[in-house]
Image (spheres, rainbow, N blue to C red):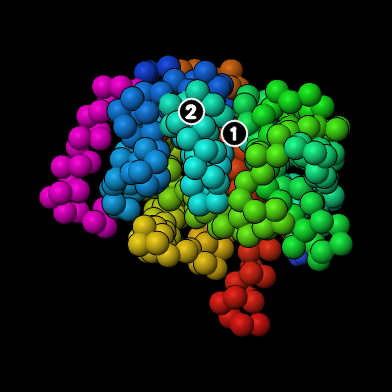
Amino acid sequence: MGLFDTPELRAFRSDVRAFIARALPQELRAATCAGLHLSRMQMAAWQGILGRQGWGAPHWPAAHGGPGWTALERYVFEEECAFADAPPGDVLGLYLAGPMLIAAGSAAQCARYLPPILNGTEFWCQGFSEPNAGSDLASLKTTARRDGDMWVIDGTKTWLSSGHYADMLFLLARTDRQAKPQAGLSMFIVPMSTPGLKLDPILTIDEGHSVNALFLDDVRIPADHLIGQENRGWDYAKDLLARERVNNAQAPRTKADIVRLDAMARTLCDAAGKPLIEDPVVRRRLSTLTADFLALESAVLGVIGRQMRGGEPGPAASTLKIRGSELQQRVTETAIALLGTRAIVLTPGYGGGPCDAAASGWIERHLFRRVVTIYAGANEIQRTIIAKSILGM
Ligand SMILES: Cc1cc2nc3c(=O)[nH]c(=O)nc-3n(C[C@H](O)[C@H](O)[C@H](O)COP(=O)(O)OP(=O)(O)OC[C@H]3O[C@@H](n4cnc5c(N)ncnc54)[C@H](O)[C@@H]3O)c2cc1C
């Protein structure tokens, strides 16, 4: 399935593979393979190992601690992590907060907040959505008002991924009620230990705790916790959401999943004892997934290449988000179809046996991935963006 099989990339890949084989603790590999939500300690352990190797933030500029890899090297690294069942990095710090601070934050903010993200000692969460402001984010009602050298924030946020183990929150709040909705928003850094914050867990369909509601009552933060300029928050949020959509295509993890499905179809047999792969319907389903994946992969690489040359993903991010998220759901649906009731037996979280590289963890993945067509901007909204920005409708 390799599209870019040059000797240099092969050598790079083998270095990365050897490092992961040496450095990744078995307990972390097993938890990732089982599709479980990882604890803060588990996430921090792997991020610390990568940070010490200088690989903590593959896509950050070298000046801010990135390893200086090309887009392809970064992609190969992510693929190797996926195939080895290494935990995914802290998306909120590494992919959202960090790049936003690099683009819009002050030098002092970068110096204070970037190193702990790299080393896995500080975690972030994202406070954009509100009970009545998800797709229509610009209608959000949380306010921030200036009081001397402090900002005072009041409101309610919801769906905060990882909020229960985050140290820091980046938050979008209304600073000008007279301006039109998008023009009156600003972005803030809020330490999660600030008095006036109350976090409530939200349990999801996979029976995991990964998201939370947050209530902010007279939360006071110093004036220098504003990111960039006052009332420019919508611009920073738009850039951040575009990055989030590219990341949400999750091409390397989907590639590893498809290889796993193929292995499963070769090992598992039907009631008559015939390997599933011999069934033409199964073969057709796997080949269609593989073909659709290759189309996604080449589109993702195109956008990553553009970003590395200083360009923006633009509306293409919406197409990647739609295709990538739909593919992730089709992959788990195929796994459940292949496994049938065996999916339950092979899933540790549901009382099943030890992790099996090909066949375990599919129920957790299948249930949690209902969300991938919703978060980072629901797919219906992405279709409207494409209609307007690409098709000119
Ligand atoms: C597990 C999970 C984790 C999340 N993590 C975070 C997080 O860390 N931080 C954060 O800020 N947010 C987070 N979100 C929130 C997420 O971004 C929102 O759920 C998403 O933007 C949709 O908003 P909503 O839930 O309010 O649904 P709504 O906006 O109410 O949409 C409901 C349905 O109506 C459709 N719809 C709405 N408007 C239109 C329209 N104009 N045209 C066509 N269809 C439309 C939507 O597509 C959707 O199908 C998370 C959500 C989930 C479920």
Q: Which of 149/243 is in front? A: 149
Above/below status of 85 relative to 73: above
Q: Which of 67/161 is in front? A: 67
- Identified at 82% across, 45% down, the residue is 145
Bin the neighbour count of mark 1 within 10 Å (Cα to Cα): few under 14, some 14-19, many 20 and up: many
Write down the residue under mark 1.
124
- Residue 277 rendering spot, x and y as whole percentages: 37, 46
User: Which residues lie in the magenta part?
Assistant: 1-24
- Identified at 50% across, 23% down, the residue is 121
Q: Nearer the viewer, mark 2 or mark 1?
A: 2
User: Judging from the image, what secondary structure is the residue with disc 2 in?
Assistant: helix
- Amino acid carrying label 1: it is Trp
**Residue pushed farthest front?**
148
Above/below status of 24 relative to 270: above
Above/below status of 77 relative to 238: above
Write down the residue under mark 2.
116
- Residue 197 rendering spot, x and y as whole percentages: 79, 28
